[in-house]
Image (cartoon, grey):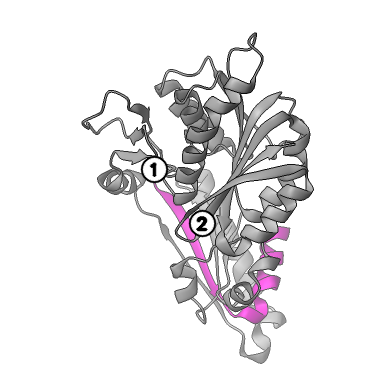
Amino acid sequence: MKYLELKIELNKDILDDAVDVLADAGFESLMIDDPADFAEIAEHPEWYKYDYINEELAAAEGQTPTVTLYFSNDEEGRAEAERAERVLQDFKDSDAVKKDGNCIAWTLGMTGDDSEWLYKWQEHFKPTRIGENIVVKPSWEDCVLESTDLVIEMDPGMAFGSGLHETTSLCIKALEKKIKPVEAARDSSDTGARVLDVGTGTGILAIAAMKLGAHDCLGIDIDEDAVRIAADNIERNGLSSRIEVRVGDLMEGVDYDADIIVANLMADLVIRLTPAAAAELRPGGIFISSGILDIKEEVVSEAVKEAGFEIEEVLHDGEWCAIAARRK
């Protein structure tokens, strides 16, 4: 499906005013790109939720700020796009824009076709081995497997990737090491480890936990699209009866007697989550956290220890790390 894209270029001095005007007119779903923010974020990464600054953002430093709005390509969407243009024209004619040589310009056009994007994505998503026995493959690819391989069939869809980022791989490797020992430590009446996946995304970690021997799993994500895609992937792997996925903000309102909590988030979210993880885990349970840059390892480790965990292992891959800790 194609969409209408309204892209606005404007001076930094009037960026906030333009966003306020659009929001007041009811256009609140805005994508704001302000390259001038790069310098401050790069200088003080500890102040911000985002640990990673990509090359595209770095290259954009010094360019003109942009605000982008999207509309459906139907009668209602076109009418809303035209209304947004009228709001922008009124703002352009105002004294706030005319003073000091400020300028604002915009273009309205079609975005690319989603099917083309998906086709290009499929060209690059190939079967991948993670850890000892986990193999992640898309449904349209065949591969040669070993007898001990555990296959996760994963079609990422439009909104989310394959889940094969370094941080995801680190979590799967930690799960490989921790699920069996946790199961062995449980009472004989119990059937296996219970795993809570916070920030489940595509559902790959929940699926991996089940493939590695967990008894059941709960996946939580704040994004409704993520939950839908995770549910599709879980069904594709025949695990719908043993993995539940639901919308939620971290562990707020969650009551799940977990043996293992895995959270592939960002450093600040891991820190925020850690006390709740300690409260939810059974004694001796394992907390696996990732999405952590090496430069944030120390501050996250301290938060994990302050919450009552003993760090058992830190795994590294490039600039990323994952921390596996046991509740005392």
Where is residue 236? Give x, y as percent: 40, 23
Q: Secondary structure at mark 1?
A: loop
Compared to residue 278, the image places residue 84 above or below, namely below
Q: Secondary structure at mark 2?
A: strand
19 is within the stretch colored magenta: yes
- Residue 141 is marked as none
Compared to residue 2, the image places residue 262 above or below, namely above
Where is residue 181? Give x, y as percent: 56, 27
Where is residue 153? Give x, y as percent: 36, 29
- Front one among 88 and 51: 51
Where is residue 205? Give x, y as percent: 50, 34
> Label 2: which residue?
320
Residue extending farthest top: 189
| Left-right relation of 7 to 98 | left
Q: Quadrant of residue 200?
A: top right
Name which residue lies at 60% across and 71% down: 89
Looking at the rendered image, the quarter that the C terminus falls into is: top right
Name which residue lies at 44% across and 24% down: 211
| Left-right relation of 26 to 173 | right
| Left-right relation of 253 to 138 | right
> Label 1: which residue?
1
Looking at marks 2 and 1 on the same chain, the residue that comes earlier in the sequence is marked by 1
- Front one among 88 and 297: 297
| Mark 1 surroundings within 10 Å by alpha-carbon count, few (fewer than 14), some (14 through 19), many (20 or more) | few
Mark 2: amino acid: Trp
Rounded to the nearest angstrom, the CA distance separating label 2 from label 1 is 36 Å
Q: Which residues are magenta?
A: 1-26
Is residue 203 among what the camera can see?
no
Q: Quadrant of residue 134?
A: top left
Looking at the rendered image, the quarter that the N terminus falls into is: top left
| Mark 2 surroundings within 10 Å by alpha-carbon count, few (fewer than 14), some (14 through 19), many (20 or more) | some
Mark 1: amino acid: Met
